[in-house]
Amino acid sequence: MSQALQQERHVAAQSAEPRVRLRSARLAYGERVLWDGLDLDVAPGEFLAVLGPNGSGKTSLMRVLLGLQPLSAGSAEIGGEPVQRGSRRIGYVPQQRAVDVTVAVRGRDLVGLGWDGHHWGLGLRGRRERRQRVDAALAAVGAAGYSDRPVGLLSGGEQQRLRVAQALVSDPDVLLCDEPLLSLDLAHQRMVSELIARHARGREAAVLFVTHEINPVLPLVDRVLYLVNGKFRVGRPEEVMTSATLTELYGTPVEVVRVGDRIVVAGAEAVNNGVHHHVEGQP
Ligand SMILES: Nc1ncnc2c1ncn2[C@@H]1O[C@H](COP(=O)(O)OP(=O)(O)OP(=O)(O)O)[C@@H](O)[C@H]1O
């Protein structure tokens, strides 16, 4: 995205009522503080990439917003209301887990669950609408051709596209995506990330997109939340993805280089509490 357009969207985003709001948010498990003092507004239509090494608390943040994990301090709101379990406003693409081969449910039924969870009283009209919505969501992720096959027999990437369709089918205001690009080939990475970004812009939804690799989504990202070992930084990619910022966050020299339109993070191994973590551009 051009810097001018990004700036313009950022300004517009600032003035709208946020879809997601965290204030002084702290999450600790026992002695271990994942993050503290986190203030974050995610505006309608905004695409926020959530980055950070293993164990930095990215999935835990999703769980907080889903109402599944209470904060240790501070507040979390969706659409101006305190977070709650089963919110109709949220679409969720969970981190991928392989589906057992014995699972006989069809792909279209899995996507239908994303609709049923939010709609009651299926009359004839309701059933027709459900079918249309499910068909549209399946087509959008390129899953129409295999939607009648048992989910357990599908490839990891095919299952992942169904999860994305399930999250989108009810037109959520907030999309929480936990590594939705895992198992997808490059063409489908692009298809899925553009679909999610289009949903954000078209439906004024806020997207929180957890990823280990920013490059596949870099053109779509408005801001980045980077979490490392209890510290964090929020800002536009060019503000956060710098040698100075990542060196400070990781507490060890990290070099960030722009190669064409890609960001390569290299130089030092990011070492956190003696544990080697994945850094962008490293295997
Ligand atoms: N309910 C819990 N009780 C105690 N510790 C937990 C709990 N849930 C998560 N943790 C720990 O908190 C840390 C953060 O976990 P989380 O899954 O949020 O990290 P993540 O950033 O999503 O990591 P990854 O990139 O590996 O998916 C991990 O060390 C995890 O073991």
Image (tube, rainbow, N blue to C red):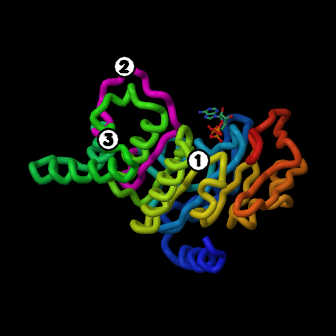
- 227 left or right, relative to 179: right
Give the residue number, with chain letter if any, for mark 2. 102
Return the residue nearer the eye: 177 or 135: 135
Residue 220 image point, x, y percent: 57, 63
View quadrant of ligand 1: top right
Marks 2 and 1, how far apart at CA: 32 Å
On residue 145, the disc is 3
At mark 2, the secondary structure is loop
Q: Amino acid at mark 2?
A: Thr
Cβ of mark 1 under 8 Å from ligand 1: the answer is yes
The answer to whether mark 2 and mark 1 are in CB contact below 8 A is no
Query: Marks 3 and 2: which is nearer the front?
Result: 3
Marks 3 and 2, how far apart at CA: 21 Å
From the image, which quarter does the N terminus lie in? Answer: bottom right
On residue 61, the disc is 1
Residue drawn 19% across the image and 53% down it: 129
Residue 70 image point, x, y percent: 55, 44
Residue 88 in the magenta stretch? The answer is yes
Q: Could you tell which of marks 3 and 1 lies nearer the N-terminus?
A: 1
**On the image, which quarter does residue 234 sit in?**
bottom right
| Chain part drawn in magenta | 86-108
